[in-house]
Amino acid sequence: MMNFYKRISLFFGVYMILVFVVYFLAEFTPPIVLNVFWCLLVFSLLMMAAYLIYHYLNKYTRKRGDRQ
């Protein structure tokens, strides 16, 4: 099982790699491809935020007796 902070750093690293790929492709590709890549970037950022919210709610809002 991966540590929570390792997952966050992995998500952030993948996000930054995708940003650099988009900037690199901006020189050679038509705008529709860039629009698709930007949509993927925004989706991945939203998924990372949703995971953070889910992890926070799951970790800090349960009662003490429910923890395993």
Image: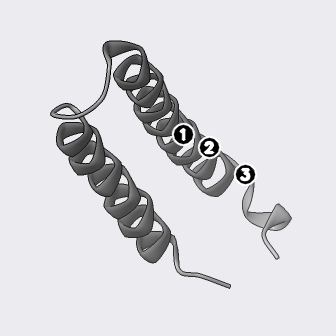
The residue closer to the viewer here, 43 or 20, is 20
Residue neighbourhood size for the residue with mark 1, other residues' Cα within 10 Å, grouped as few (<14), some (14–19), many (≥20): few
Residue 65 versus residue 46 in the image, above or below: below
Q: Which residue is mark 3?
A: 62
Q: Which residue is mark 1?
A: 53
Residue 3 in the figure: left or right of residue 59: left
The residue closer to the viewer here, 20 or 10, is 20
Proximity of marks 1 and 2: CB atoms separated by less than 8 Å: yes
Residue 24 versus residue 66 in the image, above or below: above
Q: Quadrant of the N terminus?
A: bottom right
Q: Which residue is mark 2?
A: 57
> How far is mark 2 from mark 3, CA to CA?
8 Å
Q: Residue at x 72, y 51 (%)?
A: 62
What is the secondary structure assignment of the residue under circle 1?
helix
Residue neighbourhood size for the residue with mark 2, other residues' Cα within 10 Å, grouped as few (<14), some (14–19), many (≥20): few
Earlier residue among tags 1 and 3: 1
> How far is mark 1 from mark 3, CA to CA?
14 Å
Q: Residue at x 49, y 44 (%)?
A: 48
- In the image, which is nearer the foreground, mark 2 or mark 3? 2
